Amino acid sequence: MSKIGYGRVSTRDQNPDSQRDALASAGCDRIFIDKASGKLDRRPELDKALDYLRPGDTFVITRLSRAARSLRHLLDLAADLRRREVDLLVIKQGIDTSTPTGRLQFHMFGAFDEFLRELIVEGTLEGLASARARGRVGGRPPALDADGVEMARALYEMKGPDGKRKYTVQQIADRLGVGRATIYRHLNPDKTETA
């Protein structure tokens, strides 16, 4: 049974020595350190550390934020470690999933995350219902209002001296500051027309 340590510093300028020292003091047999932003998905050293773990090992980090990009990522990581029969030790926050108390802390994290997600969904649904009751519908406002559609239609139907359309769909879209798809959606011109 090994202790595998992982640390992360946010930028090239930060020094990982304090994390490395804390992980060594915790008795880690191997230590992996990434130098990457907390938001980045790609963390090659974290991947190596996780690949190195075997059932019965302990994955050691100094703080929860060092290994996880978000609470959801943290919970997914913890579930993966449990499935693989690997314990998690978080030095600075006193979490050790090899103990009943540590496992309870993680269950509380999971319950809290689920509660927050349900509150967000409930608030969103209430807000949409309230807006509908006032005659408003959610979503982005239309790119063209009624006057804009009327202007687009007039430009589209305008003929040049040769009897052909004076403006292409692209020219109308450029003039009105919208995309071609908006013009197509409102006017339904022949989409095979060249722009």
Image (tube, helix red, strand yellow):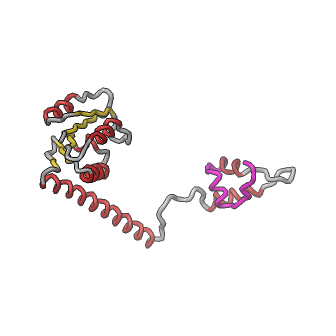
Observer-nearest of 190 and 61:
61
Q: In this view, does 27 lie to the left or right of 141?
A: left
Kindly tell me whether residue 23 is visible in this rendering: yes
Q: Position of residue 46 (x, y in %)?
A: 31, 39
Relative height, residue 22 to residue 182 (above, below): above
48 within the magenta span: no
Q: Residue at x 15, y 52 (%)?
A: 102
191 within the magenta span: yes
Q: Residue at x 22, y 33 (%)?
A: 30
Kindly tell me whether residue 71 is visible in this rendering: no
What is the span of residues highlighted in magenta in the rendered image? 175-195
Q: Where is residue 43 in the image (x, y as percent from the top left)?
A: 35, 38
Count of marks, rendered view:
0
Q: Residue at x 45, y 70 (%)?
A: 132
Q: Quadrant of residue 126?
A: bottom left
Observer-nearest of 37 and 123:
37
Q: Position of residue 63 (x, y in %)?
A: 21, 41
Q: Position of residue 195 (x, y in %)?
A: 72, 48
Q: Is residue 101 left or right of residue 193?
A: left
